[in-house]
Image (cartoon, helix red, strand yellow):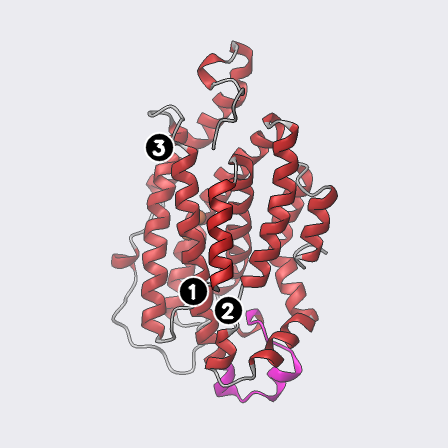
């Protein structure tokens, strides 16, 4: 749903209202130029045949959910590394789930936009990026040897409802939620020499290409929050807060704990109680929550939901 009933179509706007649309085209044009310069084919770019490197982590230990908890202190080094391998697979699985939702939202977003605009061409470019990313994440999971970790049946169903009913500003708020927190972690992962070369390569490609996606979504959401009717801005505040709660909860699939030989309940309880984990998640969300605050998404009930997600201090 990109154009609410009763909202003027872009081609019927009075001339002086075209400012935001010209701005939208300018942003898209710049993003297209950057895409032409820095896009990667992960199949060709990364060495998928290289064997795993002994003694290297699949994810930086400080970014693991259990890091620093009493349980972590009792875990032998070997088990900590196993947890890293499984959590990396769980995060890549979450990434694929999220990207598949995002691709659908983008396809819907452009359905009634001008066919030859830079804005539509950039959306198609981003969909192509996400196609390559999801294939890359799937390959990385297989290469690591840990299972794929689909989200729970409940979260899968909630995702279906959210992607079906959300309107444009809600879709872009959801996009940023999925992109910015994982992006923060990946920015810490790709330069880390303790980490497997393949994982560093995957996260590096993703960080470079995601920077454009974040820009596109932010600019669109900023415009939408100004032009959306009151009901839609209010809906966006609440739905993004609810999405933040689901996202924070689904972030690491708890089956990873069972699969590395830990008691699942105890592990989940310790992650919830971990001050370090809260700081990692809030640091990951900080740029996003500052931005959402600035454009008026973090108000009222929406703000309370964001707080209860644990992503907002
Ligand atoms: Fe992506
Ligand atoms: Fe993206």
Q: Which of 189 and 15 is in front in this view?
A: 15
Does residue 116 lie above or below 45 as drawn?
Answer: above
Residue 242: x percent and y percent?
A: 62, 50
Does residue 198 lie above or below 135 as drawn?
Answer: below
Does residue 300 lie above or below 261 as drawn?
Answer: above
Between the residue at mark 2 and the residue at mark 1, the CA separation in whole angstroms equals 8 Å
Residue 2: x percent and y percent?
A: 47, 31
Q: What stretch is highlighted in magenta?
A: 63-81
Check residue 275 for magenta coloring: no
Q: What element carries label 2?
A: loop
* Residue found 40% across the figure and 26% down from its top: 113
Which comes sooner in the sequence, label 2 or label 1?
Answer: 1
Between the residue at mark 3 and the residue at mark 1, the CA separation in whole angstroms equals 31 Å
Check residue 70 for magenta coloring: yes
- Circle 1 Cα neighbour tier, 10 Å, few/some/many (<14 / 14–19 / ≥20): some
Q: Is mark 1 on a helix, strand or loop?
A: loop
Residue 121's mark? 3
Residue 253's mark? 2
Quick check: 177 left or right of 275? Answer: left
Which comes sooner in the sequence, label 3 or label 2?
Answer: 3
Does residue 156 lie above or below 172 as drawn?
Answer: below
* Residue found 33% across the figure and 39% down from its top: 36
- Circle 3 Cα neighbour tier, 10 Å, few/some/many (<14 / 14–19 / ≥20): some
Of tags 3 and 2, the one toward the viewer is 2
Q: Which of 121 and 204 is in front in this view?
A: 121
Which comes sooner in the sequence, label 3 or label 1?
Answer: 3
Residue 150's mark? 1
Q: Which of 206 and 66 is in front in this view?
A: 66
């Amino acid at each position: 749903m990109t154009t609410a009933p009763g909202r003027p179509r872009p081609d019927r706007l009075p001339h002086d209202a075209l400012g935001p649309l010209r701005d939208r085209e300018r942003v898209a044009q710049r993003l297209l130029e950057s895409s032409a310069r820095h896009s990667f084919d992960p199949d060709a770019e990364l060495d998928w045949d290289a064997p795993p490197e002994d003694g290297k982590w699949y994810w930086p230990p400080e970014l693991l959910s259990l890091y620093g908890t009493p349980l972590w202190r009792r875990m032998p080094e070997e088990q900590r590394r196993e947890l890293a391998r499984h959590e990396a697979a769980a995060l890549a699985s979450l990434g694929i789930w999220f990207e598949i939702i995002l691709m659908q939202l983008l396809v819907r977003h452009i359905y009634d936009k001008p066919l030859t605009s830079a804005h539509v061409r950039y959306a198609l470019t981003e969909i192509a990026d996400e196609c390559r990313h999801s294939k890359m994440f799937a390959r990385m999971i297989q290469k690591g040897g840990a299972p794929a970790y689909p989200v729970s049946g409940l979260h899968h169903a909630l995702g279906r409802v959210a992607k079906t009913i959300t309107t444009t500003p809600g879709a872009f708020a959801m996009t940023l939620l999925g992109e910015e927190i994982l992006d923060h972690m990946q920015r810490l992962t790709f330069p880390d020499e303790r980490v497997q070369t393949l994982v560093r390569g995957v996260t590096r490609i993703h960080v470079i290409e995601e920077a454009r996606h974040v820009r596109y979504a932010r600019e669109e959401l900023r415009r939408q929050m100004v032009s959306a009717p009151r009901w839609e801005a209010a809906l966006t505040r609440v739905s993004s807060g609810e999405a933040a709660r689901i996202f924070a909860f689904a972030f690491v699939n708890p089956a990873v704990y069972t699969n590395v030989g830990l008691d699942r309940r105890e592990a989940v309880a310790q992650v919830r109680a971990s001050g370090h984990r809260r700081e990692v998640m809030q640091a990951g969300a900080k740029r996003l929550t500052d931005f959402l605050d600035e454009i008026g998404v973090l108000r009222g009930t929406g703000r309370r939901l964001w707080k209860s997600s644990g992503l907002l201090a």
